[in-house]
Image (cartoon, rainbow, N blue to C red):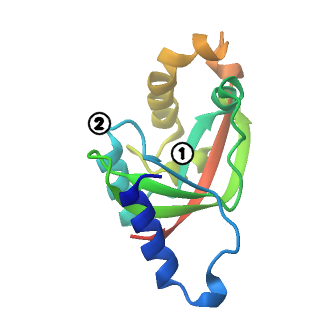
Amino acid sequence: MNQMETTFWNEYLDSLPTKYVPSSYFVEASPAGDLSTTDGLIALYLSGKKSAGSSLVEDFETMGDPLPKEGIYWIILDGKSEPKLIVKTIKTEIHQFKNVPEHVAIAEGEGDSSLEYWKKVHIEFFGPYLASWNIKNIDEAHVITEFFEVVWK
């Protein structure tokens, strides 16, 4: 984390009563999507409409990164790469792309929150990277969805 992100994280920790300060934690800082869409996604988080985000398992595997899990904190950066809120992963689910349930689309809160919209947008977003993740058919890819709670804004 850079100095601005560290300060933001420490402000969150300082706001907690001592008994609620996590004894151990993993914190990542990233935009809520790509930099062109992150501000709109932040607005959805702040309004309460967005409480989840999805990635492809194959992306994590290709990079050699561990899969997200319950208890991870994310500092969400805006379009200027400045911290705007902190979310905590409270649950994860993995589904094949073709079997993603409607509640994932609803929790992501984008567009009309339909599964049809969710699939269209995610095909467009993941499409350029599929070959690098050795995915020939996106329907067979594995989606990991993180469900969040906003803990600091």
Tag in front: 2 or 1: 2
Quarter of the view holding residue 89? bottom right
The residue closer to the viewer here, 15 or 151, is: 15
Amino acid carrying label 1: it is Ala
The residue closer to the viewer here, 17 or 132, is: 17
In terms of sequence position, does the residue under pointer 2 or pointer 1 come before the other?
A: 2
Residue at figure coordinates x 59%, y 47% from the top left: 104
User: Would residue 148 be found to the left or right of residue 128 on screen?
Assistant: right
Q: Which residue in the structure is indicated by mark 1?
A: 105
Q: Residues within 10 Å of mark 2 (few under 14, many from 20)?
A: few
Across and down, in percent, residue 138 comes to 62, 19
Quarter of the view holding residue 79? top left
Q: Which residue in the structure is indicated by mark 2?
A: 36
Amino acid carrying label 2: it is Ser
Q: Looking at the image, is 16 positioned above or below residue 77? A: below
The residue closer to the viewer here, 139 or 89, is: 89
The residue closer to the viewer here, 7 or 72, is: 7
C-alpha gap between disc 2 and disc 1: 21 Å
Residue 100 shows in this picture: no
Mark 2 in CB contact with mark 1 (< 8 angstroms): no
Residue at figure coordinates x 66%, y 64% from the top left: 25
User: Would residue 52 be found to the left or right of residue 72 on screen?
Assistant: left
Across and down, in percent, residue 1 comes to 48, 52
User: Would residue 122 be found to the left or right of residue 35 on screen?
Assistant: right
Residue 104 shows in this picture: yes
Residue at figure coordinates x 45%, y 62% from the top left: 6
Q: Looking at the image, is 4 positioned above or below residue 133? A: below
Q: Secondary structure at mark 2?
A: loop
